[in-house]
Amino acid sequence: MWYQTDNYATGVLPAALAGACLVPLSLCASWFRTTLISPHVSPRRYANSWRFCEDHHDEWKSTAEAMDCRALLVGEATGGPGGWAYMDGLSTGGMGCSPFSKGAHCPGQTEGEYKTAFVLWSVAQSPIVVTTDVRNMTAIMTQALLNAELLAIHQSTATAPGGKIATWECSEPLACQVWGRPVSADGSEWLVALANTGSKAHKITVEWKALGWQLAAEASVRDLWNHIDLPTVAGSLEREVPSHDVFVARLSLAKPRRA
């Protein structure tokens, strides 16, 4: 629901309650409003989702800014059943062309950039609102929007939303990022994304200490984009990630072998 008002109690709520069906409420830039008005009250008290960063546009600069904003405003990006921090819409595959006769999609980003946005929105458990024409699915739209394995983790409420958990040193400062979210309550399974915002390919590593695991522990690796199992690793996981792209996997601690 979009309803602009300076008084939620007398404006938004009556408008929603007057309807015959349930209406999700979303606040725009509410992290700023609610922090000023009542710094100790969560936006979840008022709405099902709230924006806390700038508008997201169909260009890499905007996606990179959204990533930085999410990494900085950790306290405002919390969420749980009933209310979620929202990183704005995803233009996966490209917005509609103008005029429409030019085609259903005029991409403003590369497939790797669309992949990066979708994966990190999923890690952060941002509501996924697609602003492109899903009647005309492109290859990247199918890979992202119909990724059952990644969406299943995104929809799980067993653990809190994830975010940026480490920065890996590479030749482009701050370009090699490690994002993650535990997907099991005991921390034995993690959703991990290795994101490269730099201008060239980099090898990026997630070390077990960032996951709270013992260095000698072994873990299985499930590539969630290509839907394949990779070899078991110990201590860390390293992948070469192209410029403006991401590698995403589910890491699961191996069960100790019995003597």
Image (tube, rainbow, N blue to C red):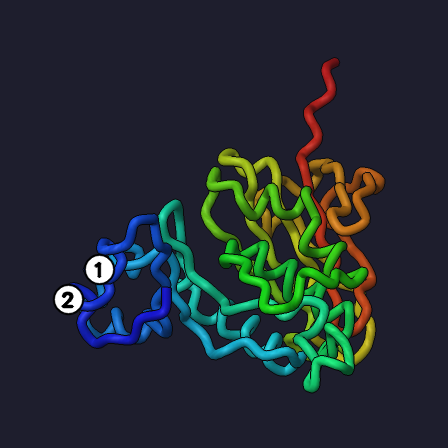
Q: Which residue is mark 2?
A: 10
Structural distance between the alpha carbons of marks 1 and 2: 7 Å
Q: Tell me the residue at 47%/41% (across/down).
A: 157
Is 110 on the left or on the right of 160, as rendered?
right
Is 3 on the left or on the right of 222, as rendered?
left
In this orientation, which residue lies closer to the viewer: 45 or 198? 45
Image quadrant assignment for residue 250: top right
Quadrant of the rendering where the C terminus is positioned: top right
Is 225 on the left or on the right of 77, as rendered?
right
Q: Tell me the residue at 62%/47% (across/down).
A: 151
Q: Which residue is mark 1?
A: 13
Q: Amino acid at mark 1?
A: Leu
Q: Is residue 27 above or below residue 44?
A: below
Which element carries disc 2, helix, strand or loop? loop
Which element carries disc 1, helix, strand or loop? helix
Residue 19 rendering spot, x and y as whole percentages: 28, 54
* The residue positioned farthest toward the top in the image shown: 259
Q: Tell me the residue at 40%/53% (across/down).
A: 79
Q: Is residue 36 above or below residue 220?
A: below
Q: Is residue 212 visible?
A: yes
* The residue positioned farthest toward the left in the image shown: 10
